[in-house]
Amino acid sequence: MAICHHSRARPLLQGVRLWLPVAMLNLSAGDRTYLKKILSLYTDANGRELLVGLTRQESERYLVLCEQIRSSGFVANADYYELKEKHELTRMRVIAAQLYLCTKNPAIH
């Protein structure tokens, strides 16, 4: 899964300077920066901001559950753990792929 580093827009057509806004998740600027830095957040080909390994709906649900746990002491449930595992396993694969590219073929990086 490729990580898109465009912040708020993406090209509509190759070589044409038309831009579509990114459908951003409900995150603070600090959270967004942190999640991008740890390769948890990316923008898909349709301009939707997602958590790696999760659909848009799953990403939104996971963020709601995380906020509930963080702010009110909500006890994590099976839904939370399922989404967390799916997200983190995919994120580890992305990190492994990036590491492979950096160490096996530095010219690509």
Image (cartoon, rainbow, N blue to C red):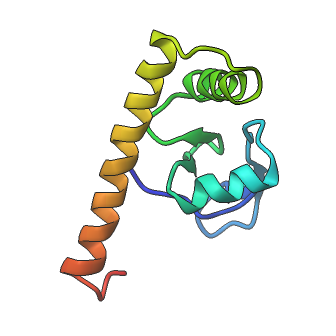
Residue at the outermost front position: 73
Compared to 16, does 73 lie above or below?
Answer: above
User: Where's residue 32, x and y in %?
Assistant: 70, 52
Compared to 105, does 54 lie above or below?
Answer: above
User: Where's residue 63, x and y in %?
Assistant: 65, 29
Q: Quadrant of the C terminus?
A: bottom left
Left or right: where does residue 3 sit relative to residue 50? left
User: Where's residue 104, x and y in %?
Assistant: 18, 78
For this rendering, which residue is in front, 79 or 21? 79
Residue at the outermost bottom position: 107
For this rendering, which residue is in front, 72 or 92? 72
Task: Give the tally of numbered discs.
Answer: 0
Left or right: where does residue 73 sit relative to residue 108? right
Q: Which residue: 76% across, 42% down?
A: 27
The answer to which quarter of the image holds residue 23 is: top right
The answer to which quarter of the image holds residue 64 is: top right
Compared to 63, does 93 lie above or below?
Answer: below
Q: Which residue: 72% across, 37% down?
A: 25
Left or right: where does residue 45 sit relative to residue 83? right
Left or right: where does residue 51 sit relative to residue 100? right
Q: Which residue: 38% across, 29% down?
A: 85
Compared to 28, does 71 lie above or below?
Answer: above
Q: Which residue: 57% across, 62% down?
A: 37
For this rendering, which residue is in front, 80 or 94? 80
User: Where's residue 96, x and y in %?
Assistant: 28, 59
